[in-house]
Amino acid sequence: GAWGSCSSDCGSGRQEKQAECSHGDAAVCLAQLGDRPHEERACEDYHGCTYDPGCPFGRRSSMACGAQLGVLLGGISAVLLCISAAVSIRLCRRHTSGTVFLPESGLKSTYQIHRPDGRKATAASSKSAANRMQTDASNDDLEDGAGGVAKDGKTHVVWETDVSELKQMFADRGTQ
């Protein structure tokens, strides 16, 4: 015959199987063999178990519950560590150049930061040099002109903007 259901619905239990008479007549089989033989075996059934947070992958897993919890918490910790490292790197990066856009005038200016520690900035604009105005620092204070290193020990911000656009903005506002 078929195996019966497991004696436990949450963990280890026992399962029984009754032998059936192949002759068809149970009375004849009992007379010849005596009591019906039966078999028994170990079984596991977990469909009746409630979720256990201490065993997140389930009790059927080949991994012990404590190890399952360690793997889960270790994975979560690794993901959080990667996210915080990426955010820290992004937030702590020192800017060396950028662009500022003034929406009411449509004027776009770029800037470069020249630090005494020697971190170089790249050119942020492709406008011609004749149309640029530099303020806040002169090339005499910077090593090799636009190299990015301030010789005088100070941090300099060099703004670059289109002079003709700047003049037009002031003219439109009625200021010179």
Image (tube, rainbow, N blue to C red):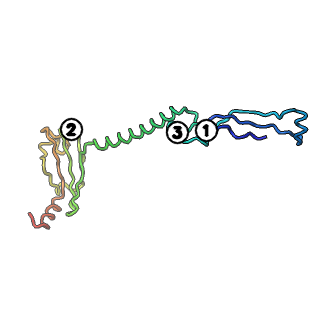
Rendering quarter of residue 47: top right
Distance, label 3 to label 1, CA atoms, is 12 Å
Residue name at image x 35 percent, y 41 percent: 84
The residue where tag 1 is placed is: 10
Image side of residue 61 versus residue 3, left or right? left
Label 1 neighbourhood size at 10 Å, few (<14), some (14-19), many (20+)?
some
Dot label at residue 76: none
Residue type at numbered disc 2:
Gly
Q: Please report whichever mark, 3 or 1, sits nearer to the chain's N-terminal start.
A: 1
Q: Position of residue 110 (x, y in %)?
A: 21, 53
Quadrant that contains the C terminus: bottom left
Dot label at residue 118: 2
Q: Where is residue 82 in the image (x, y as percent from the top left)?
A: 39, 40
Label 2 neighbourhood size at 10 Å, few (<14), some (14-19), many (20+)?
some
| Mark closer to the observer (1, 2) | 1
Residue name at image x 87 percent, y 32 percent: 34
Question: Could you say whether the residue bearing mark 2 is in a helix, strand or loop?
Answer: loop
The residue where tag 3 is placed is: 52
Q: Where is residue 76 in the image (x, y as percent from the top left)?
A: 44, 39
Question: Could you say whether the residue bearing mark 3 is in a helix, strand or loop?
Answer: loop
Instruction: Look at the numbered discs 3 and 1 and tell me whether their residues touch, using CB distance below 8 Å.
Output: no
Question: Could you say whether the residue bearing mark 1 is in a helix, strand or loop?
Answer: loop
Residue type at numbered disc 3:
Asp
